[in-house]
Image (cartoon, coloured by chain):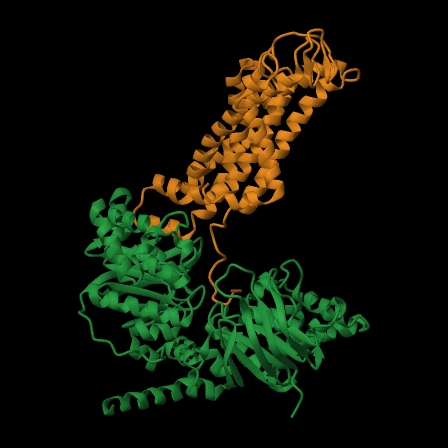
Chain colours: A green, B orange
């Protein structure tokens, strides 16, 4: 058997005092062999990013390695002086970050940035040779016309192209070990699929050992050879990908996997067809650019419409135009028989309660200086209730979204991301709206929390007959929650239909492309069989 | 302000707090702390630690009119803290009101207010002070007026920039979609979240204003004599500074110590104030 490129034994990293746990990484041992991709999965705070920093010997301030051994390519890192470590970084190990734009210097052409790596680590290489190698590296990441790309600045490239450049930089010295920290999380799904394919190919052809950190089980299913699951700093389970995904033994792993939304349309009871929201010819221009181009659709009362698309598709613009956070350039928005797009001033302020929104970022959507109670009571009063009624409603809502009554007196900083998103939902409901827009409301949440929030929204919809517009880039989430799906691209409607029809038989090639790019589809098939088998067993129990 | 205490655990901040606190105590308790009447002439040009015939001890000496310098410094603290505080507060009220309006409503209001602010800011500050005070006369009220006129535009620009950013935050958008009134959004959602940088700026600006009052005093445009005024004391002592350095040394130390204290305090408030925002979304960040 070949020697491992990375061997970690009993690694323990301490957290500064005062936190809820003492160790960021707790007694972790693992190995990465050449030509192998080991995926590390875990929710936020599980210690997966700290593990990577520990391997690069670049732990954030306040964290210190308490014990254990890290060996890269057979070299123990602990006794190495800083100068030797710098040689190791780049030569023996390299890192690929989550935000490609942020990991490139915006003021220097990308080719030059790759060249710098070579200058530092291979100063003997002649300049012409170095430039040839840069072009070769760029070509290796499947970018078209490498010499032209090399001259561009990061802002002239797309996110996916930048990530390829970052990968080319990491590969410059052909390091044995690549550390990838959520390298596709910031990318669109079609770009993600290409980058994953690229990483897999590089691993297979060049024999790098790759440690790939992700929170997405679909990505794991597509790319991993082996999987390590982390929880609260501990390695709870490690093994070949098929074993972990389909036959996990640890209850935490099972819970995580069960929380991944299924990629088939959930069977939903048909809703009554009276439209609650009618959008006719809605457009929004920024100068000559159409961010929204002639969007026309009806949304039935009590149903859920998922609006899906990649970044720049206009899905958020559509939401903001409907709710009048941006002024549409033309078209009508009819809510409850009135043209919401024509309302002005006080009349608009009074009618706003009919349509409410839950935002994406749970940390930015609540005023950190106001307590949850104040927030909910004020929303209720703006919705037309007296103070006393609004207070009763606030107590009721806090319980409804699954928080304790004490939450009313606390400020947002005291809550986790998932709890804040519940508060955001309660605030929207406090206005007693007839339409609720969820703008990527579960995208920033861990998969288990995401599942709970999705279930909460579904329950609330069943109880209150709320109409929901669910904006998401994640087709799995759309499949779980939507009656209808609207696919958008460059401000236009590409496809609109019943969720089951759109997912099973997409009529537009772009929809088909999106569906095909969603990670984890092969796994989905075996998973589907497992679910069917489980469902078949239930009656016999 | 209830969250401030952790900020005070660091030594430089404690020093800043001690210096500023010292001058505030001086200002409040001037009649009890000052050994002599600051306007009463005792013995001209006594050196520090000298005693006169009646056995009066002049810790910091006396000026050319025979007034005790220590007593004048203690009473001068009153002048500087009252008028600098008042002038800074007025400038803030106007700057904040304008900044919130311009940043929140944008468009025409913003263009008009920004233009006005830029016009005022394009004048050298000192020239503005001299113009205003020579035109209107030297008095506490006119100093407040001059400082407000010259500082409010700078505060306006800070508040406007902060408002433009905060206005796009989701919690402000949420308030808008609830039909909340513009005034309440500005005062309850935007201003408290802009307070961090503004408190720091206010501390520094209070220091600048104290210096400005000193400079105006030095130029003879300060409070009319014989009001004890640190800048005025430096000005009066200047002709004889070579022979009697204590005439200007102690007022200068007073001015710089107050400035230093406020700067240290500002640093502490900046570092110690809890961040209103965590870094954005992204489940993959460090724990």
Q: Residue A342 at what x, y percent from top left?
A: 27, 49
Q: Residue furthest front?
A: B55
- Compared with A384, A437 (above or below) is below
- Compared with B41, B281 (above or below) is below
Residue A457 makes an appearance in the image:
yes
Out of A445 and B94, give the one closest to the viewer.
Answer: A445
Residue A292 makes an appearance in the image:
no
Quadrant of residue B154 within the rendered picture: top right
User: Is A49 positioned to the left or the right of A301 in the image?
Assistant: right
Seen at 42% across and 47% down, the residue is B167
Q: Residue B281 at what x, y percent from top left?
A: 46, 61
Q: How many marks?
A: 0
User: Is A369 positioned to the left or the right of A96 in the image?
Assistant: left
Q: Residue B204 at what x, y percent from top left?
A: 58, 35
- Compared with A11, A330 (above or below) is above
Q: Residue A273 at what x, y percent from top left?
A: 18, 69
Out of A284 and A468, give the one closest to the viewer.
Answer: A468
User: Is A390 positioned to the left or the right of B163 in the image?
Assistant: left
Seen at 60% across and 83% down, the residue is A31
């Amino acid at each position: 058997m070949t020697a491992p490129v990375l061997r970690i034994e009993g690694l323990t990293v301490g957290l500064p005092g005062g936190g809820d746990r003492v160790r960021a990484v707790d007694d972790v041992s693992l190995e990465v062999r050449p030509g192998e991709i080991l995926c590390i999965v875990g929710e936020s705070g599980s210690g997966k990013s700290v593990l990577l920093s520990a391997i690069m010997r670049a732990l954030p301030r306040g964290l210190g390695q308490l014990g254990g051994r890290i060996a890269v390519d057979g070299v123990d890192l602990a006794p190495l002086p800083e100068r030797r470590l710098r040689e190791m970084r780049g030569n023996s190990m390299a890192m690929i970050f989550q935000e490609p734009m942020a990991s490139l210097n915006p003021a220097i052409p990308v080719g030059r940035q790759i060249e710098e790596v070579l200058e530092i680590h291979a100063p003997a290489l002649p300049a012409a040779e170095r430039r040839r190698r840069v072009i070769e590296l760029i070509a290796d990441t499947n970018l078209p016309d490498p010499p032209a790309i090399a001259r561009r600045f990061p802002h002239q490239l797309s996110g996916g192209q930048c990530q390829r450049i970052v990968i080319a930089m990491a590969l410059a010295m052909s390091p044995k070990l690549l550390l990838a920290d959520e390298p596709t999380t910031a990318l669109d799904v079609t770009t993600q699929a290409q980058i994953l394919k690229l990483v897999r190919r590089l691993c297979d052809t060049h024999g790098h050992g790759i440690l790939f950190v992700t929170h997405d089980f679909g990505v794991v299913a597509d790319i991993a050879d082996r999987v390590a699951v982390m929880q609260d700093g501990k390695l709870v389970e490690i093994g070949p990908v098929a074993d972990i995904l389909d036959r996990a033994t640890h209850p935490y792993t099972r819970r995580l996997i069960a929380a991944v939304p299924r990629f088939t349309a959930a069977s939903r009871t048909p809703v009554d067809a009276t439209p609650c929201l009618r959008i006719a010819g809605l457009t929004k221009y920024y100068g000559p650019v159409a961010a929204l181009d002639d969007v026309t659709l009806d949304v039935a009362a009590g149903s859920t419409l998922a609006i899906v698309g990649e970044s720049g598709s206009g899905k958020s613009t559509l939401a903001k135009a409907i709710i009048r956070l941006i002024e549409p350039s033309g078209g009508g928005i009819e809510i409850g028989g009135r043209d919401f797009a024509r309302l002005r001033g006080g009349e608009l302020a009074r009618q706003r309660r009919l349509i409410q929104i839950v935002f994406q970022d749970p940390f930015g959507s609540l005023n950190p200086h106001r307590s949850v109670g104040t927030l909910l009571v004020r929303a209720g009063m703006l919705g037309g209730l007296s103070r006393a009624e609004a207070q009763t409603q606030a107590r009721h809502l806090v319980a409804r979204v699954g928080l304790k009554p004490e939450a009313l007196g606390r400020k947002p900083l005291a809550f986790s991301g998932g709890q804040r998103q519940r508060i955001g939902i309660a605030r929207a409901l406090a206005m007693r709206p007839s339409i609720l827009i969820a703008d990527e409301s579960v995208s920033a949440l861990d998969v288990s929390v995401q599942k709970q929030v999705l279930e909460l929204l579904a329950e609330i919809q069943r109880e209150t007959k709320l109409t929901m517009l669910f904006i998401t880039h994640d087709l799995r989430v759309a499949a779980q929650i939507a009656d209808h799906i609207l696919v958008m691209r460059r401000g236009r409607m590409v496809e609109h239909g019943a969720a089951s029809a759109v997912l099973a038989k997409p009529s537009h090639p772009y929809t088909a492309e999106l569906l095909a790019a969603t990670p984890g589809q092969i796994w989905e098939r075996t998973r589907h069989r497992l679910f069917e088998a489980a469902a078949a067993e239930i009656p016999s129990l | 302000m209830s969250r401030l205490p952790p900020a005070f655990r660091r030594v430089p901040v404690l020093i800043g707090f001690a210096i500023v606190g010292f001058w505030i105590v001086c200002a409040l308790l001037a009649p009890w702390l000052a050994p002599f009447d600051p306007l009463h002439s005792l013995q001209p040009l006594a050196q520090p630690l000298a005693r006169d015939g009646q056995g009066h001890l002049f810790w910091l000496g006396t000026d050319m009119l025979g007034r005790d310098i220590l007593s004048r410094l203690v009473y001068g603290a009153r002048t500087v803290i009252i008028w600098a505080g008042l002038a800074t507060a007025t400038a803030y009220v106007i700057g904040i009101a304008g900044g919130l309006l311009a940043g929140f409503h944008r468009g025409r209001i913003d263009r008009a207010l920004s233009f006005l602010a830029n016009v005022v800011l394009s004048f050298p500050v000192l020239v503005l002070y001299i113009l205003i005070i020579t035109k209107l006369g030297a008095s506490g009220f006119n100093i407040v007026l001059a400082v407000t006129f010259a500082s409010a535009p700078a505060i306006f620009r800070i508040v406007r920039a902060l408002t433009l950013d905060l206005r796009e935050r989701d919690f402000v958008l949420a308030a808008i979609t609830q039909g909340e009134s513009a005034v309440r959004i500005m005062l309850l959602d935007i201003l408290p979240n802009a307070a961090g940088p503004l408190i720091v700026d206010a501390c520094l600006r209070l220091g600048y204003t104290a210096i400005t009052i000193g400079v105006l005093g030095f130029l003879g445009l300060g409070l009319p004599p014989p009001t004890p005024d640190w800048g005025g004391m430096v000005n009066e002592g200047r002709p004889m500074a070579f022979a009697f350095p204590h005439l200007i040394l102690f007022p200068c130390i007073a001015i710089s110590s107050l400035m230093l204290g406020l700067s240290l305090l500002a640093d502490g408030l900046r570092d110690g104030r809890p961040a209103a925002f965590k870094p954005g979304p992204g489940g993959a960040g460090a724990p």
